[in-house]
Image (cartoon, coloured by chain):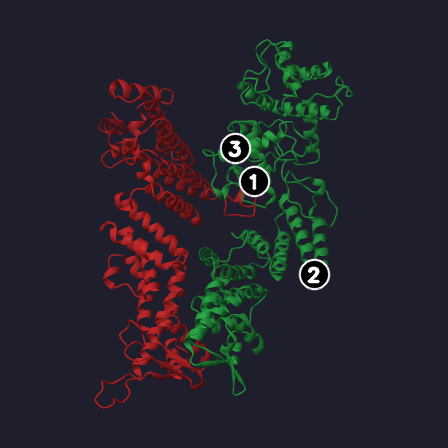
């Protein structure tokens, strides 16, 4: 007998949601490479629901309330059809189509949603919703990729806005997922039996979908809906960690994109702390945003050790970080230009750019250190020279930007850079313009947090 | 129940003794009168206007209280309309019934019920067919595949009820609900613009999913409203349902007037009021001249909107379209009308993607500046991603990028140098946020410089035209005693107090800019 039906039977018998969800997972497994095929050959399209009914009631003798049983038979029949479409990819690849897989799978999703709202599916079955939602999104992006690879020039010429339409199936999926989200969020059953426990999983799926179709703004609607319900929702800590870590990651990124870096850092740091230690890919994703966040909020750079497990990030950030540390403005600009495409794609260009301030601070700090000490007065510990001519900073900038002899460096611009560092609290002191001097604060606070 | 049973319903039930339409599925419309009545059973309200298979006689109507007696010729007319031998393939029942309803209602309202020669009046299905033929002959798309003659201004008896229903329908579109970004673009913007050939059954198929006729109609209306707003992308289904060739397709205008006021379409465009391309070209020349001469923005904006609308409804997308949008965008910029500018910018982005010519780099530069102004960083990131390496070599684009980077790093010195040397019309955009950035700069200056700075320095650093102008700007935000004259030079006393005040003003000015119509 097909392992899919076996999973279903076991799931029902033992009330195991994950087992039940396994039945609805439309993939072959290494242990069972013909998993889908054996399910598909279980019956034919004319008899599938009758066969299912016979099998579940007679063969297995499952005792499921009638309404619920009917709903399951509908779902499994739709599932069977969708599996048929998937199998086409093995049998007749030329006739296979992800769009059709998606359409059939959407039917499964719709039936499942209906079953929750009408046929009294209990909340232990909620992993089914997860797996159906998950594959809905996957099939949608495959369908959209398929559509765009088949060339859709015909309609692109038709209307001005070319952006629309290319994600049609993903948008359709977003709609269905949104219904699943509401289904979870608005369940009024007592919390033990509530679908509310699924709400973060569904939120995460929707986040993913919205990010995919460049509709990040819509994510905020979900956050609003969640916060409106926050009183009725259990504590975040009580949800499965995997749901929460993903959720926090996305919320962090949403703040990040709004340039609210301190909020972003808070959420990303949470995700970072609770992320499974072996989930390397997820950790890498979190760091992609957490590192730029840190650069902006605390002006700190990632250590070699932190990035040692993420070679991709190491490559992405290392040269930039080295230049910042050394105060090498020329190198910094070059690294920004070199990585620009990648940075823009990951949406981290704008915060990374702010690293230039830190590079500049480090360069100017060198001026201060090179300035040496004032003559010590009767036995007092020596004090660094705190009055520095602007000209010295100009010279430093010349070196830092690899300016050649003919490049004119504008003193006013250097003053502007200095005033910015002072304004942002990276330097302490003031500019005495009339005298062309910078007066830095004494007592090791001229460059706060750097020891001098 | 003052109005009584409508004749098309009453007589319909009198006529048929045999079920003529066994495969009848969708109720054609909902006779609302029944719903209003307390005496009639609720189920009546949804009874379709269909010949009942039950044998009914004329006096079955007498059960209803206070009926209006429809004259016999009218009843005969209705009977004939429903008679199977008079059906015309290609004219759906819904269409026929709607027409019938309309004809009789109009007659009743204008009290012409007994003046019309019902014997000779063409049957509604013939009217519908004639309408269609006429439309095709004119290559007009005015019915847009809706069986309702949408432009008819006449009152439909159930009008108010329809409005009510429309509201509720909008709230209960749950399962068929569309996400906000598609709300108005239900299936296919292109498809609405197609007039189907009379034999085409697609329109009916479309309605199968809708629960009722009125809801289907509502969808049509939604889609039509969407038209007026301009061009949205069509969904891929337009490829599947490729339009039948020949007379179908966009509107072709016949209007020869050069000027036309903008009117946001609430129904299908009428070719008589749409100007074809050659006329539009003349219009553009005229508008350019008028703009130079009169500089009347209200007029010119209105004219450009109608010009754009005519282009949209006729699906004209070429270099001329680009130049219309470009010119309108520039004029809107000049007048600081950012809402209108942004509409043009959005369209231009799509038009440039189709390589139709124009000045893409100029407008890509504006786009960057515009997002600086609106402080929309997510969109900024997209705008950056849009730029090709070649774009970045362009002077205007480079300038805009430098402006962005100068601001990101707080380099006001560089920013104001760039401000004084802005290519094209970017200065109009920069003007919008230059004061905001002046406040940021002053906040920094007041914190960094001590004990004072000369006003001359401020004028030069912050791109003011004169010391007076900068003094006036400063005084708008801080109190007088912080500006002092010493040794014949006016100085700004920097430090805590001034820094604090500028910081406040800066925060105020940097609140998120919200512009209507922003992407």
Question: Element at badge 2?
Answer: loop
| Residue A407, x across and y down, in percent | 45, 80
**What residue is disc 1 on?**
B189
Mark toward the viewer: 2 or 3: 3
Gap in Å between the C-alphas at discs 2 and 1? 36 Å
Disc 3 designates what residue? B169
Which label's residue is closer to the chain start, 1 or 3? 3
Viewer can see residue A68 = yes
Q: Is residue A16 left or right of residue B24?
A: left
Q: Are marks 1 and 3 in contact (CB under 8 Å)?
A: no
Q: What color is chain B drawn in?
A: green
Query: On residue B295, which mark appears?
Result: 2
Residue B37 coordinates in the image, percent (x, y): 58, 21
Q: Chain of mark 1?
A: B
The chain coloured red is: A
Above/below status of A21 relative to B107: below
Q: Relative to A52, is B410 above or below?
A: below
């Amino acid at each position: 007998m097909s392992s899919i039906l076996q999973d279903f039977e076991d799931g029902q018998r033992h009330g195991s949601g994950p087992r039940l969800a396994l039945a609805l997972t439309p993939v072959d497994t290494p242990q069972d490479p013909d998993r889908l095929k054996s399910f598909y050959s279980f019956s034919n399209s004319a008899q599938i629901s009758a066969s299912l009914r016979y099998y579940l009631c007679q063969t297995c003798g499952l005792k499921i309330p009638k309404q619920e049983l009917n709903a399951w038979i509908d779902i499994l029949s739709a599932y069977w059809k969708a599996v048929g479409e998937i199998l086409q990819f093995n049998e007749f690849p030329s006739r296979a189509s992800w769009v059709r897989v998606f359409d059939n799978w959407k039917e499964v999703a719709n039936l499942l949603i209906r079953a929750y709202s009408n046929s009294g599916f209990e909340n232990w079955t909620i992993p089914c919703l997860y797996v159906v939602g998950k594959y809905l999104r996957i099939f949608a992006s495959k369908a959209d990729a398929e559509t765009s690879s088949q060339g859709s020039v015909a309609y692109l010429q038709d209307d001005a806005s070319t952006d629309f339409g290319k994600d049609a199936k993903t948008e359709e999926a977003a709609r269905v997922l949104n219904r699943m989200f509401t289904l979870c969020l608005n369940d009024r059953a007592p919390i033990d039996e509530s679908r509310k426990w699924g709400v973060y999983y569904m939120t995460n799926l929707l986040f993913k979908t919205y990010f995919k179709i460049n509709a990040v703004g819509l994510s905020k609607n979900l956050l609003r809906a969640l916060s409106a319900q926050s009183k009725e929702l259990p504590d975040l800590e009580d949800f499965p960690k995997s749901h929460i870590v993903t959720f926090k990651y996305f919320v962090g990124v949403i703040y990040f994109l709004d340039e609210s870096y301190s909020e972003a850092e808070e959420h990303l740091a949470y995700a970072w702390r609770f992320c499974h230690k072996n989930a390397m890919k997820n950790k890498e994703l979190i760091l992609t945003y957490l590192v730029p966040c840190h650069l902006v909020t605390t002006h700190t750079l990632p250590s070699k050790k932190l990035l040692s497990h993420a070679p991709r990030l190491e490559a992405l950030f290392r040269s930039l970080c080295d230049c910042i540390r050394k105060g090498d403005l020329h190198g910094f600009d070059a690294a920004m230009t070199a990585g620009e495409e990648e940075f823009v794609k990951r949406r981290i260009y704008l915060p990374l750019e702010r690293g230039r301030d830190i590079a500049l601070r480090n360069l100017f700090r060198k001026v201060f250190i090179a300035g040496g000490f004032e003559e010590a007065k009767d036995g007092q510990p020596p004090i660094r020279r705190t009055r520095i001519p602007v000209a010295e900073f100009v010279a430093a900038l010349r070196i830092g930007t690899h300016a050649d002899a003919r490049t004119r460096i504008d003193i006013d611009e250097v003053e502007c850079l200095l005033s910015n560092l002072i304004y942002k609290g990276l330097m302490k002191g003031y500019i005495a313009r009339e005298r062309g001097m910078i007066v830095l604060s004494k007592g090791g606070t001229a460059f706060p947090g750097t020891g001098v | 129940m003052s109005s009584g049973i409508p004749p098309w319903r009453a007589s319909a039930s009198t006529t048929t003794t045999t079920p003529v339409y066994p495969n009848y599925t969708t109720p054609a419309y909902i006779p609302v009168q029944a719903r209003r009545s307390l005496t009639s059973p609720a189920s009546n309200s949804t009874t379709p206007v269909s010949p009942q298979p039950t044998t009914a006689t004329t006096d079955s109507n007498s059960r209803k209280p206070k009926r209006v007696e429809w004259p016999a010729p009218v009843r005969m007319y209705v009977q004939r309309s429903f008679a199977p031998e008079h059906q015309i393939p290609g004219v759906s029942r819904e269409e026929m019934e709607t027409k019938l309803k309309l004809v009789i209602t109009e007659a009743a309202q204008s009290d012409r019920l007994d003046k019309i020669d019902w014997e000779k009046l063409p049957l509604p299905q013939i009217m519908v067919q004639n309408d269609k033929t006429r439309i095709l002959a004119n290559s007009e798309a005015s019915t847009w595949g809706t069986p309702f003659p949408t432009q008819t201004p006449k009152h439909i008896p159930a009008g108010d009820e329809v409005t009510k229903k429309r509201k509720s329908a909008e709230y209960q579109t749950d399962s068929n609900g569309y996400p906000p970004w598609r709300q108005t673009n239900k299936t296919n913007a292109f498809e609405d613009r197609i007039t189907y050939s009379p034999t085409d059954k697609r329109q009916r198929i479309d309605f199968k999913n809708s629960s009722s006729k009125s809801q289907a109609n509502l969808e049509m209306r939604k889609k039509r409203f969407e038209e007026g707003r301009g061009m949205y992308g069509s969904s891929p289904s337009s490829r599947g349902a490729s339009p039948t060739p020949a007379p179908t397709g966009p509107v072709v205008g016949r209007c020869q007037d050069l000027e036309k006021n903008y009117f946001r379409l609430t129904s299908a465009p009428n070719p008589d009021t749409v100007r074809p391309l050659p006329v539009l070209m003349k219009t553009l020349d005229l508008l350019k001249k008028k703009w130079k001469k009169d500089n009347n923005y209200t007029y010119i904006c209105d004219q450009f909107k109608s010009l754009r609308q005519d282009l949209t409804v006729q699906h004209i997308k070429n270099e001329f379209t680009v130049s219309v949008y470009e010119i309108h965008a520039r004029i809107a910029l000049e007048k600081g009308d950012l809402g209108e500018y942004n509409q043009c910018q959005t369209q231009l982005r799509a038009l440039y993607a189709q390589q139709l010519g124009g000045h893409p780099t100029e407008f890509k530069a504006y786009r960057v500046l515009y997002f600086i102004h609106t402080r929309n960083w997510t969109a900024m990131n997209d705008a950056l991603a849009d730029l090709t390496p070649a774009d970045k070599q362009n002077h205007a684009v480079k300038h805009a990028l430098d402006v962005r980077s100068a601001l990101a790093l707080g380099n006001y010195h560089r920013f104001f140098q760039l401000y004084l040397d802005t290519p094209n019309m970017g200065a109009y955009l920069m003007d919008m946020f230059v004061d905001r950035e002046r406040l940021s700069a002053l906040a920094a200056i007041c914190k960094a410089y001590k004990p004072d700075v000369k006003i001359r320095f401020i004028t030069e650093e912050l791109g003011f035209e004169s010391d007076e102008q900068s003094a006036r700007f400063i005084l708008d935000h801080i109190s007088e005693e912080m500006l002092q004259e010493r040794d014949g030079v006016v100085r700004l006393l920097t430090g805590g107090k001034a820094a604090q005040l500028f910081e406040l003003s800066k925060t105020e000015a940097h609140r998120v800019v919200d512009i209507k119509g922003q992407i």
